Amino acid sequence: MSANHVIGILAHVDAGKTTLSEQLLTYAGVLRAPGRVDHGNAFLDAHPLERQRGITIFSDQAVFERDGLRFFWVDTPGHADFAAEMERALSVLDMAVLVVNGAEGIQSHTETLWTLLETYGVPTVLFINKTDRAACDVEAVLKELRARLSADIADMAGWHGGDLPAEVIEAVAERDEALLDRWMADDYSPDAWLDGLRRQVAGRALFPVYSGSALNDVGVPELLDALCILSENNVGKGFEGGPFRALVYKVRHDAQGGRICFFKVLSGALRPREEFSTPQGPARANELRLYNGMKYTPIPRADAGMLCAAPGLAGVRPGDIIGAGGGRNRFHTEPMMAASAIWDSAMPANRVLAALRQLEDEDPALSVMVNEHTGGIDLRVMGRIQLEVIRQLMADRFGIDMTFGPMRVLYMETIAAPAVGVGHYEPLRHYAEVHLRLIPGERGSGIRFESLCHVDELSLNWQRLIETHVCEKTHRGVLTGAPLTDVTVQLLHGRSHLKHTEGGDFRESTYRAIRNALMYARSVLLEPVCRFTLRAPADCYGRVMGDLVRMYANTDPPEMQGDRFTVAGEAAVALFSRYNDEFLAATHGRGQLQYRLDHYAPCRDAEAIIEAARYNPLADDTPDSVFCAHGAGYVVPWDQVRAHAHCPVEEA
């Protein structure tokens, strides 16, 4: 059995990532000849959309064996609109290759990738590509890498075995006290230093750098050899033994619509038809697959460290831990924008929704929200390119022509003080009453649930059902109908009927109780705030800083670096998301700008946005309740429900 090692390749768009993958896979024996992005025949960009657009959209893998190791090579998207897809792949990597465009240097998305690699603790090797370009100055790029990414950058100067370069020997010794003592005593040992290098790379204490031209096949075999050498003795640590445990990182659907879950085995092993736990309950994988590009082979066992796939596993989502322990990984990349879907009215809305739900199943960064009263569908997305891909997928996969309304900022709502709501649902032969208290939560906490209700008052199975209904849907705020967030929902009281209560009754009463509480609450409109970093020539300083002041940006002190300056800070997405084109024009294309969602904060222009939304909270989820008298149900308006409640109503 080969030891398994997962290596991902990441880069800013157009850095040559896919070209490098093609060359490396050719040397590894996966391909007879490298494909070309511009020729539309790249092995890992096999989806028609990728070949049509010439960019990587989906993360795919190749498998090869070398020096007694089995390597999984994962190609990830480079465009910022697909950063969520990249991050899901990043969560299963043992090592990463970060490609830097030698002609352009560090670009905006490069630093975002570096931050994510640091967050996930992934050992990283860098490759400076396009050294054949006249604009490429390797020494200058190395200097920039040390200044902007890490001082622990080590130029390996083409090393792929044998004695290490003198500078690397010194760098390894500086980061290992025992080796430093030996180095000072002229007691150099190639094997000891190589082991030290492996440990330091695995611990992110040192970052090897290679350079070359993927297009012209320069520096690629050296990189492949080095990756194999550095992977030895660092493969499978912590994987062997123990019960089966795996991380789901991707969901896809085949041409027949069949669902396929991709996962990395973290410990133990799994055989077909063995039962394991999932967040949705027990499950079995009737078949296990090993994918190599678009093709797969059935395998009798999934071992620790492998990337595998299994058909089915309904309800399992990327980020889920399956097997022992359970749980869920939270990803850091989140959308900041929304758009409304538009389609031919002759097409049934339920068919459109089912198709979008399948795409949502594959991409957790895509959130599909339905207005139950109008039938309209809103999408939370990363950007315009992602919308174009969704439009093409809807046409190609489902035969549905779709367009989208204008992109808009995705606002959210929360509350500023506790509020209590009552939900009662009692049409004839139905009964359920729920009392909930909403409490402001920490920023970024989402919706949480806790019960203060004793089981003598309401049995535990009903309480768990209420928790399910609290967390199962996106609850809308009452200011603009934006999603509710950062709220803890406390169950205060509940009542059921021994004969007439059904599960759906508590769903109705829970929804109504939340809405009822929001009608009493001090609601707050939240807007997304991004963290940005921009670099520009010094002669643009006044113009750029003036723009940031105009956008009410909160900036750190600018840093001057020769003839360029760098400034980082925070700004509201509503203002900053439109700034990219203006910034490039102001800097004549010489500036670099990156930003990502950092947090939500109270909206600066809340009154105007609420007024423009003209949202009627009574026309959406109802805050009213249904009571029963004389054998018939009747509706009680939200502000009169407390007087009719069967349980005692507590103060907020």
Image (spheres, rainbow, N blue to C red):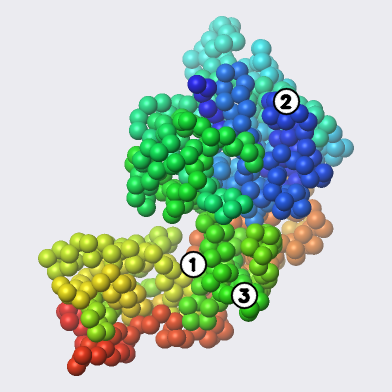
Tell me if mark 2 has few (under 14), some (14-19) or many (20+) residues whose alpha carbon lies within 10 angstroms of its own.
some
Residue type of the residue flagged with mark 3: Met
Is residue 94 toward the left or the right of residue 536 in the image? left
Residue type of the residue flagged with mark 1: Ala
**Extreme residue in the bottom direction:** 630
Q: Nearer the viewer, residue 148 or 648?
A: 648
Front: mark 2 or 3: 3
Instruction: Decide which of tag 3 and tag 1 comes sooner along the chain.
Output: 3
**Extreme residue in the left direction:** 456
Could you tell me residue 199's position as x and y percent?
52, 23
Instruction: Decide which of tag 2 and tag 3 comes sooner along the chain.
Output: 2
Is residue 371 toward the left or the right of residue 41 in the image? left
Front: mark 1 or 2: 2
Tell me if mark 1 has few (under 14), some (14-19) or many (20+) residues whose alpha carbon lies within 10 angstroms of its own.
some
**Separation (CA) of disc 2 from disc 3:** 50 Å
Disc 1 target residue: 601
**Separation (CA) of disc 3 from disc 1:** 39 Å
Disc 2 target residue: 27
